[in-house]
Amino acid sequence: MRRIRANAIAILTVAWILGTFYYLWQDNKPQSSPSSVTRGRGHGGPRGGVPGRLEMHRDDRTIPLIVTQPPRTEQSQLLGGFDEKAYLSAKQLKPGEDPYREHAFNLQESDRLGSERSIRDTRHYRCASLKYDSDLPSTSIIITFHNEARSTLLRTIKSVLIRSPYSLIQEIILIDDFSDDPEDCQLLAQIPKVRCLKNERREGLIRSRVKGANSATALILTFLDSHCEVNTDWLQPMIQRVKEDRTRVVSPIIDVISLDNFAYLAASADLRGGFDWSLHFKWEQIPIEQKMARSDPTQAIRTPVIAGGIFVMDRSWFNHLGQYDTHMDIWGGENFELSFRVWMCGGSLEILPCSRVGHVFRKRHPYDFPEGNALTYIKNTRRAAEVWMDEYKQYYYSARPSAQGKAFGSIADRLTLRRKLNCKPFRWYMENVYPELRVPEQDAVSSVMKQGGLCLETRGPDLILAECRGLGVNRPQPQRWELIEPHIRQQDLCLTISGFTAGSKVVMESCSSKEPRQKWKPKGTALQHMVGGLCLDSQAPAGPPIITQCRPQLASQTWEPQIIS
Ligand code: LR7
Ligand code: MN
């Protein structure tokens, strides 16, 4: 009896030690796959066909292949009476037809894949052990489409049904935006939980989504593009965040489905949404300070804007904030309008690394724009800029001069909405949400730095006082300086003190906004260094220029900037 007990204890001890080792090994395991890419192109602006850029990524550790699929019996019930084979085979690529022509992706590959497949779980391995509330609210999934391929559309829907807790899906609302074949949508309504709404004319994705949202019955809205594949446990993290705080608007990390071979590729987990002044969306690295502060890779990432197609939002918050600007047409710009509105009117935007959704990124629009692609994008972004960007809209117009004078309709309703919601100014957004977006430099004042008949000039890194040349026609021109506070510069070189003590020489060095030795401000006719408070002194006629105690009456500290246009 005693021997049996001793043996049992020994076995338990060994098992416990092995278990501990396995656990530690799991936590330190090197990455199981190096394939991580930054998402293809940004979207936004009429597309020039910028090719997708693939980039290897370092620390995006993922768990090995874990495929979430319910048992077969359950799966056949998921589709109810819907005849999947008939649906897909009714539309096949004809022999010799260009597989990219109709959808701007390889239709042949998509059809070949069938309606479902296993994909790699691309999340950080720590995501798998996170727990979510057992009483999460359910959601209405809203998918709008115009002439989507049947195989990609069906895969989007099936991936949702297969990889979400069934009870969290209240319904899947399809909005057929006036596609050529009404059966593309109608037949899918045979799948349990799927509903099909149809537009009587082409509306574009913005009005279509509003239509979907207005007919949704769940308290939470989930928007998806019509060519997605959701990944393991994609939904719970997003619903959890929104349940905790309804003012959060959350997106997954958007993985890349290759438009050529439909491979599912993990996207980098270090990106957020950004833009330039022409309102062109781009993925950008999380600022380094934020990255350093991230101790937990499962944490939400704050983002200045969302890509726009895939996000979860509380329905009452969506309605309270004014849904979308329904005077925007077809495609584009609505993601900026929504993003500015959410941030400026009291909400926030985040990307959740533990939620992953694949999307087929394309290089061109496969559909037509009734008013033309460029005009539509300008109309939509102009509306966003005019309503939300205050005085900063001038930078949008400088970056997109062709937008000036183009029609954009009335924005009175949206301005009333902004007032009613008591939203913050765009300046607040710039200072608190997107300080990394640089404001274009103001036109610099270009001037000669004159002292009596002498001018401050550079000779390599050194400074001298030379006789002012020219200032007349056909004479060699004197050197010009740009005075952009706090810098005094010539091209990339800035006036720099070599030390902070009186008597330190002044030289030219590469400009840097962080360099304290380059900061100056005018003090009467003198130029004072901002850190030590000493003044630029030419020591004329002996030279070289140094900094010394300010004595503004001294001729050697008197500078007369003479502006030349
Ligand atoms: O007239 C139209 N009617 C529609 O219903 C035009 C389009 N659509 C549908 C279309 O079928 C698709 O389901 O709208 C959806 C989006 O159109 P896409 O897939 O042609 O565009 P996209 O993937 O480039 O779109 C991104 O930017 C758009 C700007 O208006 C929208 O916000 C899209 O939802 C958005 N997609 C994503 O954010 C997915 C990730 C891509 C990125 C970055
Ligand atoms: Mn898309």
Image (tube, helix red, strand yellow):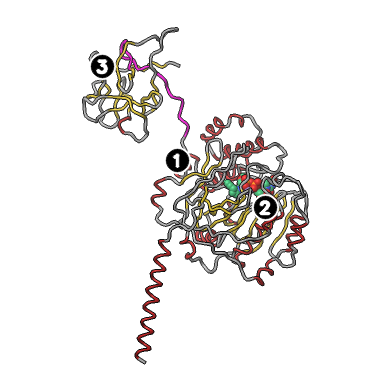
Residue under circle 1?
A: 436
What percent of the width, then of the height, locates residue 201?
76, 46
Q: Which residues are magenta?
A: 439-456
Q: Residue at x 78, y 51 (%)?
A: 181
What percent of the width, then of the height, locates residue 187?
76, 59
Residue at the bottom extreme, as displayed: 1
For numbered disc 3, what is the local secondary structure? Answer: helix
Query: The N terminus appears in which quarter of the rendering?
Result: bottom left
Residue under circle 3?
A: 556
For the residues labelled 3 and 2, say whether their Cβ atoms are less than 8 Å apart.
no
Amino acid type indicated by mark 2 = Glu
Q: Residue at x 67, y 48 (%)?
A: 106
Q: 296 or 429, which is in the foreground? A: 296
Q: Nearer the viewer, mark 3 or mark 2?
A: 2
What percent of the width, then of the height, locates residue 424?
50, 44
- Give me the disc on residue 109: 2
Amino acid type indicated by mark 3 = Ser
Q: Which comes sooner in the sequence, label 2 or label 1?
A: 2
Q: Which comes sooner in the sequence, label 3 or label 2?
A: 2
